Image: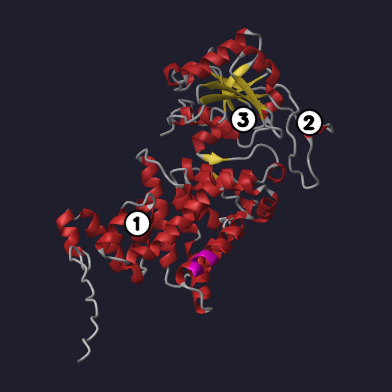
Amino acid sequence: MFATGLKQGASDNLRGSAQPVRIHAFEHKIQQEQICERADAIIRKLQKAGFEAYLVGGCVRDLLLGFIPKDFDIATSAHPEQVRKLFSSARLIGRRFRLAHIYYGRDYIEVATFRAPHDESSQGQVNEQGRILHDNVYGTLEEDVWRRDFTINALFYDPVGGDVLDYVGGMQDLAKRRLHLIGDAEQRYREDPVRMLRALRFVAKLDFELDGPTGELIDAMAPLLNDVAPARLFDELLKLLHSGQGWKTFCLLEQYKLLPILLPMTADSLAQDAQGIYRKLLQSALSNTDHRIAEGKSVMPAFLFAVLLWEQVHSQMVQAQLKGHPELQALHIAATDVLRDQVQVTAIPRRFSNVTREIWGLQSRFRHRDLRRANILLSNPRFRAAYDFLYLRAAAGESLVAEDAAWWTRFQEASPEDRIGLCKNGGKKRRTKRKKTKPVAAE
């Protein structure tokens, strides 16, 4: 539900305005009690010290839309070093984009200095393709507005005075539920190609529509993502698929032809998925992840990649077996090759890829049904993730594992006595071999 309280059309003349429209406290629905107390205290302290300071970005957008913000970010005229002098717990981070984190135990509030257009100095470098290399040219509030990506993320809220400042028609776009890049769309995508991914994430999360060139240029500009650091693309991919709208976002990545860039092997597998089994697996896994996030439960990046790369791993494992490799060795070869290739695109940390390997490696062990092996597998720390993966494979239509998934479902629900009955040779003593005795020689 749109909760700004601003009349439709009241800001139709805002886009590109040199002066902001000031939306007073009685004209919007943001309440003081909705504001993070720590962020509010930081802003008041900055303002008391003579600096401008506002809440900005996603937190203002979400408050106006009636959502509870996950983070509260602050923009200020104070430079990072000045912020550090004011707050003893502040730490300065980043080279490409210098900012301050003010810590409260393990938690922190992010404080960024107003940015200005790039100059020729080392603090504002742009490469030949127009991509921002360094973004540390400080400026004014009015200049900072034009450096932000989307109009709906360029709204500034002053919790002290209660006003929202809108320079670029963000309130209008919120009311019309559309996503619009600030300024020239091609230039903004060249400055930072990741904005294409952010655009699709916001469309899925907020149920908005892409406006004009913001959406129309994505197909042509998509190759720019090939020059983004794999570590950054990994972070963005997690944000996309762990946003609570993972399946919807995945479909948008397909629609706008970004999937082959982020997950080339997944895209190849889908192209060869004649029966639709792999697509069902992806849909079930991402939909289940969405439900877990909605319920406040934890999710595993390792499980996500186990699903996304499974079809390629399984295919290459079969090929390795045809060359004479035993099953486990074939799996190891396939997993190594597939993860190596994917890491070139999205740098999956080893702490995740190792767990992904374990999930794959346990799949063959679900075929064993004797009580001893079943109990050992059940106590494995990765059992639950591996079983969930097996179950999803069966539900998607992998007939070879359907019986195993059904048996392990019954085994988990059974009592200790019933588990014995479910297992082959369960509860029976091993037969001991009789020692062969030499025949006594006749005298």
Nearest-to-viewer mark from 2 and 1? 1
Q: Is residue 16 visible?
A: yes
Residue 338: % across, % down: 56, 62
The residue identified by callout 1 is 387
As drawn, the label of residue 13 is 3
Element at label 2: helix
Q: Amino acid at mark 2?
A: Gln
Instruction: Give the quarter of the image for residue 98.
Output: top right
- Of the residues under marks 3 and 2, which one precedes in the sequence? 3
Residue at the image point whose x is 63% and y is 27% from the top: 167
Q: Is residue 162 visible?
A: no
Give how far apart the Cα atoms at labels 2 and 1 are.
51 Å
Magenta residues (range): 329-333
Residue reaching furthest front? 443
Q: Nearer the viewer, residue 267 or 312?
A: 312
Q: Is residue 387 above or below residue 183?
A: below
Q: Nearer the viewer, residue 427 or 73?
A: 427
Q: Is residue 110 above or below residue 44?
A: below
The residue identified by callout 2 is 123
Give how far apart the Cα atoms at labels 3 and 2 are.
34 Å
* Residue 76 belongs to magenta span: no
Element at label 1: helix
Residue reaching furthest right? 120
Q: Amino acid at mark 1?
A: Tyr
